[in-house]
Image (spheres, rainbow, N blue to C red):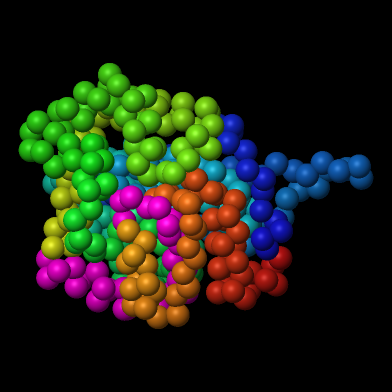
Amino acid sequence: MRDLLAPLDRTTPLWPGEQVRASGWRIHVRHVPRPEPVHTDSGTADVDAPVGRALYVHGLGGSSLNWTDLGEVLAPVLDGYAMDLPGFGFSDPPPGGDYSLTAMTDAVIAVLEHLGGAHLVGNSLGGAIASRVAAQRPDLVTTLTLISPAFPDLRPRIKRLSFVPLTLATVPRVGPAVFGYLGRVHAERQVAQTLREIMVRPQVLGPTRIAQAVEHAVDRAELPWAPAALSGSLNALVASWLWMSGRDHWRRARMITSPTLVMWGGRDKLVSAAIAPRVIRTIEGSRLVMFGAVGHVCQMEIPLETAREIARHVEIADPASLVAC
């Protein structure tokens, strides 16, 4: 299956998206385009249909754009969908401004029910949410992949506290206003700083992906709920870490039965790789892949390597896919 992966092209346009109404939510979901037919000397051959479906869930302050390169590399294998969490990207904010992990989990479950289940992939906050989804609705999760999941890590870390977008989001009234201003007036600076914090080598994205991120930041700045989405989600995540010292996260993780792959960047500034061993000890049968000189978003920084590991994970966990290939 890993031999079927598409080559990496960081110049492609963004995937088409649509507003999906599911269980009372209005969620923006992008769909990975099908790979182009293969042209050979003997003619043109259609690409085989993917062997499964994947749903990608982004992290705090991210969006469905975070999965563009990984989703396209995996497209010959997995029919990919990337959702914007409520209040992020172009999804509507949650009813009543509820950015709790419980509400976010409900939203992901609603999209999975709409799709009919999937291989679930989550990064950072999306990883913490995906783990809860897998524990609560294993019938919807064929396999689970967690990339630097935001599991409780209460040790003070100067690098994390110096990440200005997250720091601003915690300041009542002033923080959201300043954050909105930066998005409107200094979008390029904001994107550049964010990429430096979440990646070791942000330059690998190339000019097209960076321009797309800047355009998205400008568009987001026009949405009145955007600053509240960031602050509300961050506060809810931190509160979940503090409540009973985060034991609820670990309790739910012990309930996961879906085959689970955990990936981490060794130079992650936001969620330390030091907690990775506890994550795989807690999720029975899970497997850990560590990438040394990589930051918080393996799927963006090294999409080819990340895709190979996910394809291998699907092969091992879903024997039916081997027959399909």
| In the rendered image, the vertical position of residue 127 relative to residue 251, given as above or below | above
| In the rendered image, the vertical position of residue 142 relative to residue 194, given as above or below | below
Left or right, 312 with respect to 260, comes to right
Decide if residue 315 is in sight here.
yes
Q: Quadrant of the N terminus?
A: bottom right
Q: Residue at x 26, y 55 (%)?
A: 104
Question: Any magenta on residue 254?
Answer: yes
Q: Residue at x 24, y 64 (%)?
A: 152
Residue 312 position, x and y percent, is 60, 66
| In the rendered image, the vertical position of residue 213 relative to residue 288, given as above or below | above
In the rendered image, the residue lying farthest to the top is 185
Q: Residue at x 32, y 29 (%)?
A: 190
Q: Work out whether residue 320 or residue 197 is closer to the camera in this orientation and state it.
A: 197
Q: Quadrant of the C terminus?
A: bottom right
Q: Work out whether residue 321 or residue 306 is closer to the camera in this orientation and state it.
A: 306
In the rendered image, the residue lying farthest to the right is 42
Q: Which residues are magenta?
A: 243-271
Figure disc tally: 0
Decide if residue 110 is in sight here.
no
Residue 303 position, x and y percent, is 55, 49
Residue 116 position, x and y percent, is 46, 62
Q: Work out whether residue 275 or residue 293 is closer to the camera in this orientation and state it.
A: 293
Question: Any magenta on residue 225?
Answer: no
In the rendered image, the residue lying farthest to the bottom is 284
Residue 194 position, x and y percent, is 34, 37
Q: Residue at x 32, y 67 (%)?
A: 275
Left or right, 238 with respect to 220, comes to left
